[in-house]
Image (spheres, rainbow, N blue to C red):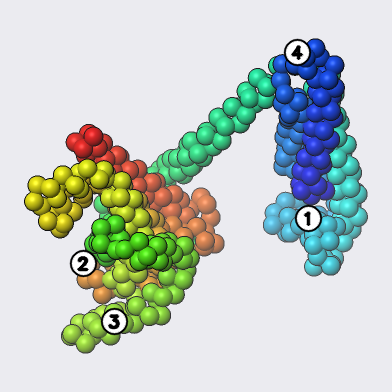
Amino acid sequence: MSPAVLLLLAFGLGLVGWLAARSRAWAFRRAAPGGRIHSLPNFHAWYVALWIAVPALLFAFAWNAISPGLITQSVLADPAASVLPAFGFERDSMLSEARAVATGSAAAVFNTEAQGLVEPFRAAILRYEAIGLIVTVLIAFAGGAFSFLRLTPDFTARTRVERAVMNLLLFASLVAILTTLGIVASLVFETARFFSMVSPIDFLFGTHWAPDPMSSGAVDGKQFGAIPLFWGTIYIGAIIAMIVAIPLGLMSAIYLTQYASNGVRQVMKPLLEILAGVPTVVYGYFAALTVAPAVRDAAQAIGIASASTESAVAAGLVMGVMIIPFVSSMADDSIAAVPQAMRDGSLAMGATKAETIRKVLVPAALPGIVAGVMLAISRAIGETMIVVMAAGASANLTANPFQSMTTVTFQIVAMLTGEGSFDHPATLSAFALGMVLFLVTLTLNFIALRVVKRYREAYE
């Protein structure tokens, strides 16, 4: 049974409990002196509905996670499973084929030995689906009976429902924190495994990057020098892209807030922010098919014969265009939020409009501008598709913007999408690169917070 069926069942039973509890609460209200009860009928209804739906949903999610393993164990215990190999890829493949046919996802099996497992799979699936359905209904009825019998005119349903909603909000607020902790824990664990095979000195300060995920035998740590990757990431994402994004984004924000009419602003700002919604693969195609050849031809026209179709400047230019909305939107909101009294005071003292913008508005809005720039840099150094399609895969340590380069994100994708083992240092290097990228973005956020705090204190 699909998880959607158990989900709908839990919600349906919860709705039934909601209606029954609300009807009972209205009966209490009609019978009470003056029609006064402790909590409104809707709170009684939600109390019963939560007791029905929440335990049923928790069981449904847990059952959906464990039932495939139980089904597989049941099939393996069947005499028909004696034809399977003891272990290995072939055994798993035959089980997958039989399961696909049993569930209707496939018409027939490829391995004839797996045909005998189709019926045991069907029987096991039906049995465990029935168990899941029955237990879900029993849990829902048990929760409904428990909560429904507690309803009285003096029952504090409102307090209990509000406490449940508070716990739900607390859980929602913890999701981001727990997710971050999980990401950090996985990165630290896999990075430690990598550094047990490769010296951190060779990785952090080496200048030659050429890992081979298919190699065997002794590991040469000199192949894992990540300096070219760090340089390519900084050069493309934090230098070239920022040279494009910061001036254009800041100037567009100043124009829209200080010079543009309301009609122009209402048209131009949404058009500018559309850039943030364009998929990065579209930017990648634009960079590879339009910008990169144009950059190469322009470079060759001025005498740079070594200019490549895949170049850092092509990727950086398109990446800069992509992150203009991050800078512009934050700067726009920050400049618009500067009190009108500061503008009027500057103009009253004889300053021109340009001087007011340069010496009053931009410094006062600097916290928001810095936050937008830091967000844009973090977005740029984490970009992958534009680098894949426009900058190339060569780990070159060069300052020539017309040469092919690669970045940390590209190599993470390359190392994790190959056929190498997860015990190989080449694959594990992706986690070490991810850890470095995480620490860099964390540092940028700390810097942004410090700058924002300093200037906010100065202008508050």
Q: Which residue is mark 2?
A: 399
Q: Which residue is mark 4?
A: 154
Residue type at mark 3: give it. Answer: Arg
Q: Which residue is mark 3?
A: 296
Query: Which picture quadrant has residue 148?
Result: top right
For residue 334, side relative to residue 350 (left or right): right
For residue 169, side relative to residue 318 (left or right): right
Pointers 1 and 2 in contact (C-beta within 8 Å): no
324 vs 190, nearest the viewer: 324
**Distance from the alpha carbon under mark 2 to that under mark 4:** 77 Å
Please, what secondary structure does the residue beneath circle 4 have?
loop
| Residue 138 seen in this snapshot | yes
Residue type at mark 2: give it. Answer: Ala
Residue drawn at (27%, 73%) of the image: 403
Q: Which residue is mark 1?
A: 95
The disc, 3 or 4, on the residue closer to the chain's N-terminal end is 4
User: How many other residues sit within 10 Å of disc 1, few (<14), some (14-19) or many (≥20)?
Assistant: many
Residue drawn at (74%, 59%) of the image: 93
Please, what secondary structure does the residue beneath circle 1 have?
helix
Of labels 1 and 3, the one closer to you: 3
| Residue 231 seen in this snapshot | no
User: How many other residues sit within 10 Å of disc 2, few (<14), some (14-19) or many (≥20)?
Assistant: few
User: How many other residues sit within 10 Å of disc 3, few (<14), some (14-19) or many (≥20)?
Assistant: many
Residue type at mark 4: give it. Answer: Asp
39 vs 133, nearest the viewer: 39
**Distance from the alpha carbon under mark 1 to that under mark 2:** 54 Å
For residue 427, side relative to residue 330 (left or right): right
**Distance from the alpha carbon under mark 2 to that under mark 3:** 16 Å
The disc, 1 or 3, on the residue closer to the chain's N-terminal end is 1
